[in-house]
Image: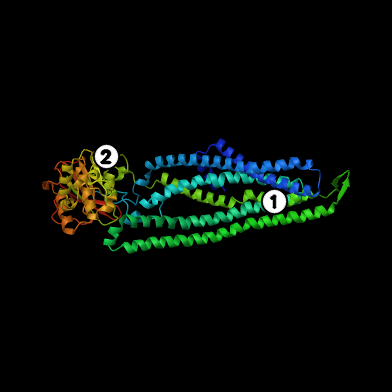
Amino acid sequence: MKAVVADFRRIRELLELSRARMALSVGWGVLALGSGLGLAALAAWLIARAWQMPPVLDLSIAVVTVRALGISRGLCRYLERLATHDVALRAMSTARTTTYRTLAGANIWRPRRTGAANGDGAAAGLPSAEAEGRQGDPTQLRRGELLGRVMSDIDDLGAVVVRAFVPIAVALILSLLAVGLLASISMPAAVILAVALAVSGILAPWLSARAAREAELAVRADRTEFTAEALTVLDHAPELRVAGRLSEAVGAAAAAGQRAVAAEDRAAARGAWAAAVLPLSIGASVLGALLIGIVLYGSGSPVPTAGFQTVAPGGITPMAFTVLVLVPLSAFEAVAVLPAAAQALTTGRAALHRLDRLEHDESATPASEFPELPPGRRIAVVGPSGAGKTTLLMAWAGLFDAPRPGVTFFAEDAHLFGTSVLENLRVARGDITAGEAESALRAVGAGDWLDSLPDGVDTDLVGGAAAVSGGQRRRILLARALLAPARVLLLDEPTEHLEAAAGAELLHRLLDESSGLVERDRTVVVVTHQLPPDTKADTIVRVEPGGTVSIERSIPTVTT
């Protein structure tokens, strides 16, 4: 219970909920459902009183009040929805701003600690292949997971206001009013109603929350996995097909989707039991009130007195009898939404915990623990997949702390925009001319492709990366990096998707100061899986699984 209360406070703090606005929402909700409760009680009284055929003027006030309550119920419901959604949308906007600002400086963008590494040039903190591929840790999000999870979590927190906080407060107040109304007629009936309301307001939400928790643990993980796998297929279908892994990737996405559907079905079955509690509680309450009403009505027969009917001690009037039976039907309207409120609370608490883990993760490696950029003008970084080569390159670029001036990072999945080739290259430098763009493309081996374009560098790439092959995309991105004004070029797998001979030849030129591809006074760092023989790199940095970084060969040069 303490954990639940603490989570409530944390949600309220994160959403920065206004007490005044929340009170206004609850007030309109009480008036809306209170109008329904009063309407049921007054209509029951009016029906029974009309059966006695009194003068019409005796019923005029009740008739007008019934009409007023019928109108006010709909009006107050609209105002309650308006006020509640106003609070929720304001809170979600605040939560998004707070979360994005916090995540911008959070440790989740840094690699995980995997233990110290030893050896020449070793550094603690580079993630192993297992760590980089781990999907269970919410602090290690892939692109698809980050895209769906944070947005969804904030939406879940906003839903807590609309579906939980306000409905729970309204249900509590209305339940007390309904029990108090029945207590004025019959205390045993009021006790039965109180027990039935407690069962439907506590047991049903508990069962519903349990089902939601199971769904949260099973469905959310599988849905997130499905989103990530599907995005991988959509983004890299050509590469996966060439590698013969497209069917495997599609199968993984389909399997994750099937697991999610199965988990949803199991959670729905448990939710059905929770939904059955409410009608059973209503039936028990109405039946109990009816039996008590029959006993009370029969124990005190009406006695005519001066045109009116009074009741002997211990009995009730026909009007009180109808109120006693019909009020419970309306009283349960307030608690009917509590199972959904419990589900919203469970989902919201899980979302809160995920956001907190993202914002307060302490397992990341500070940038100061990475090795510094080694000496040399031409540096090759080699190692198996998943060893942490890209992470090391990003650390050298300053992407885990303050960006470092004069350094450009060539990401293997950098974006190509749906505009001309020239404008895509101008991402690196806005004043690039058509001649400079053409020279850069030919320098990286894209001359034949450029000659095949109808408008040369002014040709639009319709769909961005979808308009070119994987190898062409790498050459465009490499040309963009070469045109950047930075003195240090950090190139991540620039020859991936190229033919073996063409890739090896391009690596030779990148790592050879005398090739003329890159100016001599600029530093080039190249990440590659396979380093060609007879390379002219000044320094070779080897990254081993587990985080070991070693300098295999280095010659004294001026460092940047």
Residue 369: percent from left, percent from top: 30, 45
Does residue 80 lie above or below 465 as drawn? above
Callout 1 touching callout 2 (CB < 8 Å) = no
Q: How many marks?
A: 2
**Residue under the point 39% across and 43% down:** 103
Q: Is residue 204 left or right of residue 181?
A: left
Q: Quadrant of residue 131?
A: bottom left
Q: Is residue 65 left or right of residue 350?
A: right
Tell me, yes or no, if residue 134 can be seen here: no
Does residue 511 lie above or below 264 as drawn? above
- The residue carrying pointer 1 sits among few (fewer than 14), some (14 to 19) or many (20 or more) residues within 10 Å by Cα, namely many
Q: Name the outermost residue toward the top.
A: 20
Residue 492: percent from left, percent from top: 24, 50
What residue does disc 1 label?
A: 328
SS at mark 1 in the image: helix
SS at mark 2 in the image: loop
What residue does disc 2 label?
A: 404
Q: Please, what is the three-letter code of the amino acid marked with disc 2?
A: Arg
Q: Please, what is the three-letter code of the amino acid marked with disc 1?
A: Pro
